[in-house]
Amino acid sequence: MKFNTTLRAALIAGVAAVALVGCSDTDISSPGAPVTQPPSTPPTTPPTTPPSTISLVPSGGCPTGTTESTYASVPADGFSSVDVCALSGTVINGITYLTSDVSIPAGTTVAIEGPVFVGEEGGNTAILTIEAGARLYGASSQGTANATDDYLVVSRGSQIIVNGTEGAPVRMTSRAALNDEETGSSILEEGTTGQWGGLVLNGFAQINACIDGTATGGTAGCEKSGEGASGLFGGATSDDDSGQLFYTRVQYAGVRLTNEDELNGIAFQGVGSGTDVSFIQVTNNLDDGIEWFGGTVSADHVVITGVGDDSLDWTDGWVGSLQYAIVYPGVAGADGAMSGDPRGIEADNRDGTNDKTPFSDPKLSNFTLINSGDASTQQGMLLRRGTRGVMANGIIADWSVGMDVDSDQTFDNYLDGTLQIKSIFLDNVVNFATDGDNPDNAALGVPAFVAGDTIVEGASQLSGTTFVPGASGIVPGNNVTAVTAFDVSGIGELEATDFLGAVSGASDTWYAGWTVDIAGNTVN
C-alpha cells in the first residue's frame, strides 16, 4: 500500500483546522500498536486488459447528495472502469463534507472518494441514511496507490442510520471486492486487508483523554482528536446519539499511517448510549476490528474476523456493554499484514496514567475468542492499564496464552471488585500468563482466582461453523455447556443467559446469512 500525500495532507489539515497541540499522554495513540507498516495487498495476477466498464448508476439517476462519477480502469491492479454515484458535498482541503441529509436507497452502490465527513464539526449537521442492501466502497480512484485515502467519518452532532437486514446487510467494502463481484475477477485473496480506510463515528459522550491538559475527564472540556485526521470527539453527553448500525459489514479496510496512528474497521470515538449498534461484522481489516475510544455506546451480536491487530480494543474510558461476540483474528496473507501483537481483546483504561477517570468500565458477556492459528497472535484476552469492567461467560480457545492481566491498577481494580472476571472457559496452549505481573504473587500473570469465579480449564470441544478454514468452530462442547453461567442481570445493558460463549449451541445461528468468512463466503 502506498500511503501517499493525500491522506497525510488530510491529517495535517484536520489537526490545523482545530488548532490542536498534542502532548505526552494526550497525544493520538492506540495501545498495542503494531510494530510494522506493511503494504496493502496488491492484486495477485491482474488481467492485462480489465473487463468493460462496470455500470452501477441507477436508471433513475443518482440520489440527492451523490454525483455520477466515472473512475478510470487501473490495469496494474486489475480494476475495470466504474460508472457510479459518489458521495458529494462541500470540498475543503480535499475533504468532502455532507452538509445536508443524504439517503442511499436500498440496493444502491455508492463510492466514497477521499475522506468524507457526515456533517461539519461546529457547523452544519447532517444525517446519512443507508437502506438495506446498499453497498458503499472506497473509490480507489488511482488504484491501490490511494486506496486508503477513502474513509467515512460521522462528525459530532451528525448521524449515520444504517437500515440493513439479515437478508440484505449494508456493506462497506473495497473497489477490489466490487470488481470481483461485478466482473468475476479474482483480485482478492483470503488474507487481503487494507483496501480502504474504514468507518469512524464521533460523539459528545465522556472520555478521559483530554487535549487540554487542564480539562477534567468526562466533562465538556475534555475532547480529543481522532486518529487519521478523523475529527474531534468527547464531551459530557452520555446519551448522545450518533445514529444506528443494523446488519452492517465493514470489509477490507484499515490504515496504518504510523505505529501510533491508524484507522480501524470501525472506531467508536466518544459515542453515546443513544446510538444503537446490533449485528455488525468487521472482516479482513488491516488494524483493529473495532476500537472504542471512551464513550458509552453498547453493541450486541458482533463478529470480528481476519483482522491484522486486535479484534476488540478499548481505551480512554469506554463504559458501554458488549454481548454476543465472535472473534477470529487474521492469518498472514500474501501481504503478511499481521501486526506484532494481535490479540482477541486488548483492554485499557489509559496508557501512562492508569487511574484516569472516568475509568474504562465496560460490561462483556457471551463472547467466543478463537485463534485462527497465525503464529504472530498473542493473548486471547489482555486486561491492562487500569481497565475495570465485567468479563463474563466467555470462551477463549487455541491461543498461545489465553488470559493475561497487567498493571498494578488493573489488579487493584480486581481486588476492589471494580473488575470482575467470571465464568470463563479456557482451552489454550497456556491458559494463564506467567509473567509475574500479579503484585502479590510473582509466579502469576493473572489474579488468584477462587472457585466462585468459575474460571475453568479444559478441552472446549468446539465444533460446527468456523470463519477460518482449519480453525475450531463456535459451537461449545459438553465440557463448556456444563459450566454454570454468571448471572449478569442488571449489569449494564446485558441480558441474563444460561450459557458461555457467543452461541448456546448448533441451533443458535444469529450470525447466519449476513456474515462472511475470511475468504468472503457467506456463512450460513
Image (cartoon, rainbow, N blue to C red):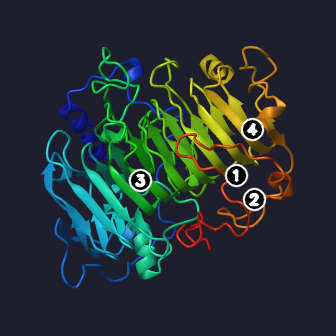
Name the residue tied to disc 2.
Answer: 472
* Towards the viewer: 303 or 342: 303
Disc 3 marks a residue whose amino acid type is: Asp
Q: Is residue 51 above or below residue 88?
A: below
* Towards the viewer: 359 or 349: 359
Residue 512 lies left or right of residue 244; in this view the side is right
Q: Which mark is residue 276?
A: 3
Q: CA distance from mark 1 to mark 3?
A: 26 Å
Q: Residue at x 51, y 70 (%)?
A: 45
- Residue 340 in view (yes/no): no
Disc 2 marks a residue whose amino acid type is: Ser
Earlier along the polypeptide chain: callout 4 or callout 3?
3
Q: Is residue 412 above or below residue 5?
A: above
Q: Nearer the viewer, mark 3 or mark 2?
A: 3
Q: Quadrant of residue 388?
A: top right
Q: Is residue 512 above or below residue 314?
A: below
Disc 1 marks a residue whose amino acid type is: Ile
Q: Are marks 2 and 4 in contact (CB under 8 Å)?
A: no
Disc 2 residue crowd, few under 14, some 14–19, many 20+, Cα 10 Å: many
Residue 50: x and y, percent?
38, 78
Q: Residue at x 86, y 53 (%)?
A: 479
Residue 340: x and y, percent?
60, 38
